[in-house]
Amino acid sequence: MTLPPDDHVHTEWSWDAPAGAMDRTCRRALALGLPAVAFTEHADLAPWTLPPGTDVPDSWRPLVTDGVLTPPPLDLEGYRRSLAECRERYPALRILSGVELDGPHRHADRAAALLREGRFARVLAAVHSAALDGGGHTEVSARHADLPSAQVVRTYLADTLELVEQFGDFEVLAHLDYPVRSWPGDAGPYDPGDFEEEYRHVLRALAASGRVLEFNTRVPLHGRVLVWWRQEGGRAVSFGSDAHDPAALAAGFRDAARTAEAAGFRPGPDPYAFWRRA
């Protein structure tokens, strides 16, 4: 099976990927036979209030003040320099510039300024942040501790719908099932069917906008969601490992490709392109 491009990869230029390494990721991409890789570094635009007692990784500690983590801006100069070096070193691999925006609909001016300056080939948008009752935001997984997990998912999908409807300057919607990564064991089995109406609402809006749904393999997207995507008019699928270190590049892509084919999406003659509905 020919693997699709990995269109969602992080390196040392993402603030939360200390094990990332652009050069080693390129070498692994060639070894795996990937046609292309997109380095979509984080641009998290909202500070996160950390729950009391949060075990903060050592690499995050300089970013935390009085219990609030403020992600740093993307170092565009260093990132571009690393891209240029890898493109020169690995001419057989197509290397795309990219960014993953967190909640750009809430920070439209900052997001637009970054996109103008970055001129990225691949722009992903996502929701990593959840609003707190008393104001501010925290990372989505933290809300499982103080809200029913079903409510966390529904709130997340409502936020994602706002993103799709209110911010137009992105191409790919990343990890639609992000809260599932932190689904608590005591909440019972996760079933996407419990949220079918909410999923379909987001997918319908995304399809109407002509944009692309990501099949993120960090926690593989459920096949039913891909079927709903096609039924709601979705025309294309992107594949992303969301790798934060070279070893995770293209993880689960063979199974993901089979799931996408079963849902009615196929690769075309261009190995670098998104998979399209059959």
Image (cartoon, rainbow, N blue to C red):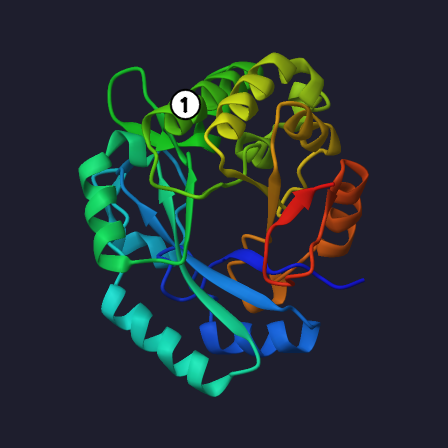
Q: From this viewpoint, which residue is outermost toward the bottom?
A: 89
Say which quarter of the image contains residue 189: top right
**Residue at 56% across, 16% down:** 198
Front-most of residues 47 and 83 = 83
In the image, residue 265 above or below residue 272: above
Q: Residues within 10 Å of mark 1 (few under 14, many from 20)?
A: many
Front-most of residues 193 and 260 = 260
Image quarter where the N terminus lies is: bottom right
Say which quarter of the image contains residue 181: top right
Residue 68: percent from left, percent from top: 25, 38
Q: Is residue 145 visible?
A: no
Residue 108: percent from left, percent from top: 23, 35
In the image, residue 249 above or below residue 27: above
In the image, residue 159 above or below residue 219: above
Which amino acid does the dot numbered 1 rest on? Asp
Q: Is residue 242 left or right of residue 51?
A: right
In the image, residue 260 above or below residue 103: below
Q: Is residue 15 visible?
A: yes
Image quarter where the C terminus lies is: top right
**Residue at 34% across, 53% down:** 60
Residue 76: percent from left, percent from top: 26, 64
Which structural element holds mark 1?
Answer: helix
Q: Which residue is mark 1?
A: 159
**Residue at 28% across, 72% down:** 78
Say which quarter of the image contains residue 69: top left
Residue 211: percent from left, percent from top: 49, 37
Q: How many marks?
A: 1
**Residue at 47% across, 23% down:** 156
